[in-house]
Amino acid sequence: MEEGGVSLESSPPPPRALAVPTPAASAQPKVPRAVPAGERAQVVVEKSGIEEDQGFEPPPSPPPRRFGFWPWSRQSTNYRYLTRSVIEAIRRAPVKRRRWQFIVVHNSGTRQGNARVFDYYHRHVRRMQNGLAYQFVIGNGTSTGNGQIEVGDRWRRQINGGHVHSDYLNNISLGICLVGDFNRDQPTRAQLESCEELIRYLRERCGKIDRGDIPVRPHREINPPRWPTDCPGDVFPYSWFRRF
């Protein structure tokens, strides 16, 4: 039937609800939520200077005292730069077995200075709680004697160094700083001879590691690649390291 040109159709019956079985939920793999950078947990590594469960390295016997005029009455090991006070400071420190895995050689980057000056700079300017970043400093004849060895508090207390840009390496590396800017000048002969004496005695004091004697490296070879450095300087005689 049409009314006014508009087709009228009867309304269809309302739809009937049909029972449809609900499919079983399938296990979906869990996708980890992306954590914003600000919410990531920060890893804090704290390493103490002494871990008693490792045991301690016994110190070597002290060198005999010099007495008498005749050659056979003198000590068998002739140290020119390792004074008795330096040897005693090295011997008395409570050195843990296999604690020290590297010996790292630095230059101060300054033409003068000594342990006291560097300690002030590291403590008050660099804000390093334990002060002097190195375990040992060797003078060049300006602020201390040429080849004079100064023992830092980090060695006496056997705590981490602060001389490498890595917490892990600072925990296992001894730092020896030669006073001087070796991008402009070479170290003095006395400094190199003194450093060699010190390294050989430290190797004896600290004992062997898994690879044998403790390896000796310039700072530039051990610093992480992310933080390159030219230390101990471009004119340092790197062939000197071959003797170790």
Image (cartoon, rainbow, N blue to C red):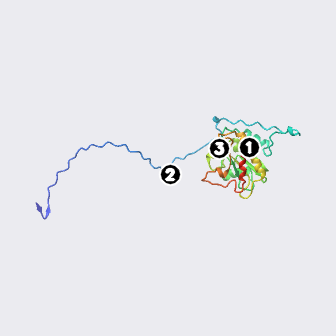
Residues at discs 1 and 2 in contact (Cβ within 8 Å): no
The Cα atoms of the two marked residues, 1 and 2, are separated by 47 Å
Question: What residue type is disc 1 on?
Answer: Arg
Disc on the earlier residue, 2 or 3 = 2
Disc 3 marks a residue whose amino acid type is Ile
Residue 134, horizontal then vertical, whole percent: 69, 48
Task: Check disc 1 and report the residue beneath it.
Answer: 200
Please report whichever mark, 1 or 2, sits nearer to the chain's N-terminal start.
Answer: 2
Residue 172: assigned label = 3
Q: Which of marks 3 and 1 is nearer the N terminus?
A: 3
- Measured as percent of width and height from the top left, residue 91 is found at 74, 39
Q: Which amino acid does label 2 sit on?
A: Ala
- Relative placement, left or right, of 32 versus 166 is left
The residue sitting at 70% across, 51% down in the picture is 106
Going by the image, does 89 lie left or right of 48?
A: right
Image depth: mark 2 or mark 3 in front? 3
Q: What element carries label 3?
A: helix
Cα distance in 3D space between marks 3 and 1: 17 Å
Q: Tell me the number on the disc at residue 37.
A: 2
Name the image quarter holding the N terminus.
bottom left
Q: Which of marks 3 and 1 is in front?
A: 1
**Which is closer to the viewer, label 1 or label 2?**
1
How many marks do you count on the picture?
3
Q: Where is residue 238 in the image (x, y as percent from the top left)?
A: 71, 52
The residue at 11%/62% (across/down) is 2
At x 72% / y 42%, what residue is drawn?
202
